[in-house]
Structure formats: C-alpha cells, structure tokens
Amino acid sequence: MKRLQDRVTLVTGSSSGIGAAVAESMAAEGAKVVVNYARSSKGAEAVVEKIKAFGGDAIAVQADVSQEDQVKNMFQKVIDTYGTIDVLVNNAGLQKDANLVDMTLEQWNKVIDVNLTGQFLCAREAAKEFIRRGVTPEKSCAAGVIICMSSVHEVIPWAGHCNYAASKGGVMLFMQSIAQELAAYKIRINSIAPGAIKTPINKEAWETPEAEAELLKLIPYNRVGVPEDIGKAAVWLASDEAEYVHGTTIFVDGGMTLYPGFATGG
Ligand SMILES: NC(=O)c1ccc[n+]([C@@H]2O[C@H](COP(=O)([O-])OP(=O)(O)OC[C@H]3O[C@@H](n4cnc5c(N)ncnc54)[C@H](OP(=O)(O)O)[C@@H]3O)[C@@H](O)[C@H]2O)c1
C-alpha cells in the first residue's frame, strides 16, 4: 500500500516549479492528482502526462485561485470527477516586486489576492467537503489534510517584497487559525516554508554562477533547493506518518532561517 493510495489531491499552481514536483511526488505515492493552473495549460498537461506515464492518475483543471466563482467550479469539477477530495495543497503563488514607495496598489492587491485570498477560498471549499464526508478509514485517519505553501518569508522580513512577505506572514496566522478551528473534525492543517528553491519564480537569484554564489551565502547547507525537496516533505506531511503534526510550519530551507549572517560574528 502506497502512502497516499487513492487520496484525491488538489495541488493549486502545479503547472510549474514546486507545485509540479508536489503533484508528481504525490501521484507516485498513489494519490489521484488534480493539477491546477491559471494560464499555463501546456505546463499542466505536461505534468498530467508525466504522471500517467508512470501509471498514475491525474487531470488538469484551470482556475484562478483568487476568483471565488472559479474556485467553486474547480472543486465541483474535482468532486464530479473523483467523488470527493482528501488533500489540498495550497501552492499557487507569485511575486510582483517593488520598493514600497514604487509599489502600485495593483501589485499589492495581486499578490495578496493570489497568495493569501486564494488560500482562503480553496481551504474553505476543501474544509466543507472534509466536514461533510468525515474520515474514510481505509484511506487515512484524517478527515482531510491541507498543506499551505508558505515561505521562509513568513518570518524573515524582505525589503523590496513587502507585498509577498505580508502575504506569507498572513498565510502563517491563517493556517494556525483554521488549524485551531478544524482540529476537532480530524482535519490536519500545516504549512511548508521553502527557502530558496530553483523554479521560474526566482530564476534571477540562481541562473548565473555569480548569482548562485551570492544566494549560497544565505544557505548554511550550501545547496540551493530543488522542487523535489518540497515534494518529499509534502508527501510525508499529507500521509498518516504525520498524523500528530498539526498547526505548524515545516521549514525546508537548508538552514536559511538560522540567520547565517551570525555564524561568524554578531
Ligand atoms: N521557489 C522558491 O524559492 C519559493 C520559496 C518559498 C515559497 N515559494 C512558494 O511556492 C509556491 C510555488 O512557487 P514556485 O516557485 O513553484 O513558482 P512558479 O514556478 O512560478 O509556479 C507558480 C505556480 O502558481 C500558478 N499560479 C499563479 N497564479 C495563479 C492563480 N491566480 N491561480 C492559480 N494558479 C496560479 C502558476 O500557474 P500559471 O503559470 O498557469 O499561472 C504556477 O503553476 C508559491 O506559493 C511560492 O510563493 C517558492
């Protein structure tokens, strides 16, 4: 029996980067995976094909997670296709970087809408279905699992990215609050906080050797992360091996939150 056998798993923003790796890792453990995307249908289809190629089960569903009607339609599609949902990975996210004095309201709103409101809209729909259905003992001892993709920037301030840091700080207290609220239903909710992971979102930070060397100064483990590092953590967190892990953030960051600037001084 694989660790996520037959668990219906929606991974938002899984046409690329971390979400794609999480979708593939979960499918490899037996999950039926819904690959959500906003614009990149080709990327989403490629992930679905990769999963099917190793005998997994997956479909692609388009929806902008910041739009309430689209999120509701997506959940309806998941339930129409697979009958229910067992795991939600709230992963979709983006950056619109600017210094405070140059940041437009549009840049601010876009990041908050996708990174924070999107997590609220999807968690709400998932929780309704988890509560309606309850525990399915042959699948899991949880009535449902939600994993929120946060960031080390839920705790590390980030000049030039105040909209992003505010969205992830918001995700932290959102996750903890709903974890408190839904524990009695046996719904488990946690966050993963990645450090620097090689994906398109942060390409300029690692695509040249000079940029990567600069980035490594922030990573005690001396390796930039890859999406599969997050996939492995997500599989474990969704599985019953993590049954008693609830309302917390797992940092997968090579030690970035150890304040490496203090390693030789301070
Ligand atoms: N990479 C890192 O170092 C890092 C570190 C910490 C946290 N994270 C977090 O990890 C998550 C994934 O980031 P990534 O690095 O994998 O970035 P990425 O490669 O740019 O992927 C972002 C994904 O989000 C989707 N997306 C964007 N807007 C969306 C919307 N409105 N509705 C639905 N999907 C949407 C994109 O789909 P489309 O292309 O179809 O729009 C894409 O699949 C984000 O929440 C990010 O904040 C990343």
Image (cartoon, grey):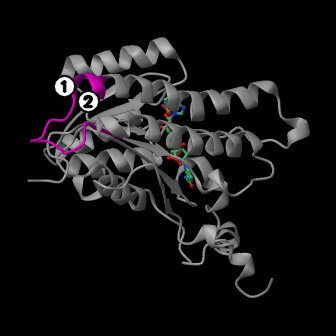
- Residue 46 visible? The answer is no
Question: Would you say residue 138 sits in the magenta stretch?
Answer: yes
Query: Disc 1 vs disc 2: Cβ atoms closer than 8 Å?
Result: yes
Tell whether 44 sits left or right of 165: left
Span highlighted in magenta in the image? 129-145
Q: Quadrant of residue 230?
A: bottom left
Within-10-Å neighbours for mark 1: few <14, some 14–19, many 20+: some
Tell whether 151 sits left or right of 146: right
- The answer to whether 227 is drawn above or below residue 118 in the figure is below
Q: Position of residue 38 (x, y in %)?
A: 48, 26
Residue lying furthest front: 184
Identify the secondary structure beneath mark 1: helix
- Residue 109 visible? The answer is yes
- The amino acid at mark 1 is Tyr
Identify the secondary structure beneath mark 2: loop
According to the image, label 2 marks what residue?
Answer: 85
Q: Position of residue 262 (x, y in %)?
A: 74, 80
Looking at this view, is 192 or 144 the one in front? 144
According to the image, label 1 marks what residue?
Answer: 82
Q: Nearer the viewer, mark 1 or mark 2?
A: 2
Residue lying furthest bottom: 264
Q: Residue at x 81, y 41 (%)?
A: 98
Question: Would you say residue 59 sits in the magenta stretch?
Answer: no
Q: Residue at x 53, y 17 (%)?
A: 67
Residue lying furthest right: 101
- The amino acid at mark 2 is Ile
Q: Position of residue 228 (x, y in %)?
A: 38, 59
